[in-house]
Image (cartoon, grey):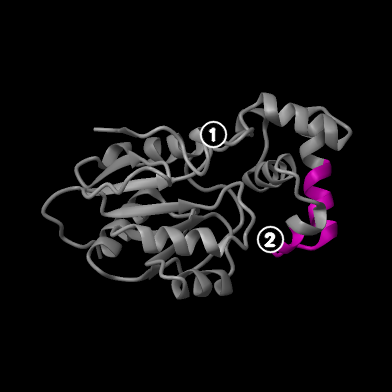
Amino acid sequence: MSAVVSRPVRLAIVNDYEVVVAGVVAMLDEYLDRVTVVELDAHTPELADVDVVFYDTFGRAHDDGVQLADLVRSRAAKIVVYTWNPRPDVADRAIALGARGCLSKSLSAEELVEAVEAVHAGVVVTSPEFNEGFGGGEWPGRAAGLTQREAEILALITQGFTNADIAESLFLSINSIKTHIRLAYQRIGVERRTQAVAWCLQNGFAPGPPNGIESSVYS
């Protein structure tokens, strides 16, 4: 059941990749009467009229609780972790750090809007299931046929993470990581890690300004 609000909830998104933010904006375009999306750089001054902030985990090492905790402390808005394949213990940790929810990218636009409204109303919301696969929105490399999981692994490779680091961050086995990498390489037409990094840097995998993108308001 959606919460009743007197005006659209103002939602900000913290993510280094503009295409990811744009995907969420497009996904919620039909619900502007209920949710207004604002792009937000994590280091900009406090925006008093932002109600809820999505901390989008795409392309981030999983164990970055320090940044999440800092975001919770620095903003009056309610912080929600937005991810497409979390584990229950990840959600528990996010809530322990002060987040007001952990939402899966497998949620439909309607479900996402209802969750945002519930968080704004004071409810701690965690998606009942965390499923790997395609969720709403966009991600770097989608046009090349990369899945979200493959794209996220390539994003972490581009940032210099080893296969072991990525496996630990995403709670996957080394063999699973290697399989995703092999499939990703086939899709983008490369054979070596250096080639993959070069391709990624040319195709939107380089993060924008530190921890965010330029601020603008969608209305």
Q: Residues within 10 Å of mark 2 (few under 14, many from 20)?
A: some
Q: Nearer the viewer, residue 126 or 59?
A: 59
Quarter of the figure with the C terminus: top left
- Dot 2 falls on a residue whose secondary structure is helix
Locate residue 198, reporting x and y percent: 76, 28
Quarter of the figure with the N terminus: bottom left
Q: Amino acid at mark 2?
A: Ser
**In which quadrant of the rendered view does residue 205 lie?**
top right
Label 2 vs label 1, nearer the camera: 1
Q: Which residue is mark 2?
A: 169
Locate residue 72, reporting x and y percent: 39, 62
Residue 79 vertical placement versus 194 (above, below): below
Q: Which residues are magenta?
A: 167-182
Residue 20 vertical placement versus 105 (above, below): above
- Dot 1 falls on a residue whose secondary structure is loop
Locate residue 142, reporting x and y percent: 61, 33
Q: Which residue is mark 1?
A: 208
Residue 20 vertical placement versus 164 (above, below): above
Q: Earlier in the sequence, mark 2 or mark 1?
A: 2
